[in-house]
Amino acid sequence: MISNNDTLFARAQLTTPGGVNSPVRAFRSVGGTPRFITHAEGPYFWDADDRRYIDYIGSWGPAIVGHAHPVVIKAVQDAAARGLSFGAPTQGEIEIAEEICKLVPSIEQVRLVSSGTEATMSALRLARGATGRDKIVKFEGCYHGHADSLLVKAGSGLLTFGNPTSAGVPEDFVKHTLVLDYNNCEQLEQAFKDMGDQIACVIVEPVAGNMNLVRATPEFLQTMRRLCTQYGTVLIFDEVMCGFRVALGGAQALYSIKPDITALGKVIGGGLPVAAFGGRADLMKHMAPLGSVYQAGTLSGNPVAVAAGMSTLKLIQEPDFYTRLTAQTAKLVQGLSDAAKEAGVTFSGDAIGGMFGLYFAAEVPGTYTAVMASNKDLFNKFFHAMLDAGVYLAPSAFEAGFVSAQHDDAVIGATIAAARGAFAQLA
Ligand code: KE4
């Protein structure tokens, strides 16, 4: 039977490259037809065939309070009724900026933008403008959006500069980007020894979620912080994904490490386009119109999007929000691990706050190389068995998963029951 998803996917490809507006949605990593979502509520969404799924994407992080939360929807409706966008400052922008600064103490000043890419791109430009240096350091497996100088894979040699991961990015645009191994302290020490006084910034996902979930070791982040301080390099924590996801104060609260600049997104928009970059006031003062680092945006701080973000930020401050979210995520991963073990399938899982990683590997990976060694084919079979059972996981073996406050015991229990059947198909 031709599903409505097939029909819509064929039609979409006539007008949009790959039929999607963001590549990961096309299911090319797992195969099959993407599900076209018609509506969502709480932990669920429905596809074009009106099939219900338990959703573990949550829009890749924003839907932390659950889809279509009545408080968020009302805030958006009320804001929209007052007009959609003014291109002029509003009180709501002040209020969400104050809330972000309160919740993330390393952020003394913050600038709102419309996507995580804009946030990290602007943070890089700020670091380069404030230090007068060109070189930047990122890590293999971390994704920071699609700004040219960040679409880079590791160079051939250990400490050579990166090569573009995308066509259309001139070599010149990445020749200042050094790509190192995540969780490799020795390599980082060596890079700073060789060229520390030329490095404008280090940008890192303090809890990586774009090579699947990989935690930074405390030593790795401590080494990074020490070296950046020693060499006058700006330390940028890209918390677009892990911010307000792994803890109320983000990964920097969990690790007790203070970055110089933080990039935020996803949760702070509650599903609408709000992202931000902010940090030390002495750095932020370089931003136009005060300073010489230019950055702008027609829809930056959009009042309707800010209403969604602000209402979400209020809801996640409810008592025990993260205690409950963390417990539910841990329950999910433990249940999946038990189910895999019962089926004799080599599998491991990790959970931190409301974020989780599933690996068809004997142990939870701590490096990019280890993640890449996990069994992608088994994941893809598991993904489709779960999808057929009404559970929607990230359509890639190299993405993290997300739990919302609405994923209660019944939802987690149904997921684990589905997994028992899925693992049985793999054994
Ligand atoms: P956006 O430009 O997609 O809003 O944010 C880019 C970004 C920056 N930093 C981190 C740590 C991120 O995770 C992201 C975006 N995350 C992906 C998930 N792998 C978004 C999903 C997509 O690309 O469609």
Image (spheres, rainbow, N blue to C red):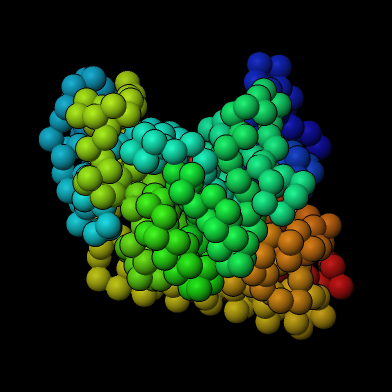
Q: Say which of 321 and 123 sits in front.
A: 123
17 relative position to 265: left or right: right
User: Residue 360 in the image: x percent, y percent?
Assistant: 76, 68
Name the outermost residue toward the left.
91
Examine the rendering and report whether any part of residue 40 can be seen. no
Examine the rendering and report whether any part of residue 85 can be seen. yes
Q: Say which of 337 and 66 sits in front.
A: 337
Which residue does the image show at 27% across and 43% down from the upper left? 283
Q: Quadrant of residue 173?
A: top right
234 relative position to 368: left or right: left
Q: Say which of 330 and 204 sits in front.
A: 204
User: Residue 365 in the image: x percent, y percent?
Assistant: 67, 69
Q: Quadrant of residue 253?
A: bottom left
User: Residue 141 in the image: x percent, y percent?
Assistant: 64, 52
Does 156 sit above or below residue 349? above
Q: Quadrant of residue 347?
A: bottom right
Which residue does the image show at 37% across and 52% down from the upper left? 232
Which residue does the image show at 76% across and 71% down from the upper left? 361
Does 158 sit above or below residue 421? above
Quadrant placement of the C terminus: bottom right
Q: Say which of 9 and 109 sits in front.
A: 109
322 relative position to 186: left or right: left
Which residue does the image show at 77% across and 64% down from the upper left? 374
338 relative position to 191: left or right: right
Does 388 sit above or below residue 363? above
Quadrant placement of the N terminus: top right
User: Residue 249 in the image: x percent, y percent?
Assistant: 32, 63
Tally the marks. 0
Name the outermost residue toward the top.
15
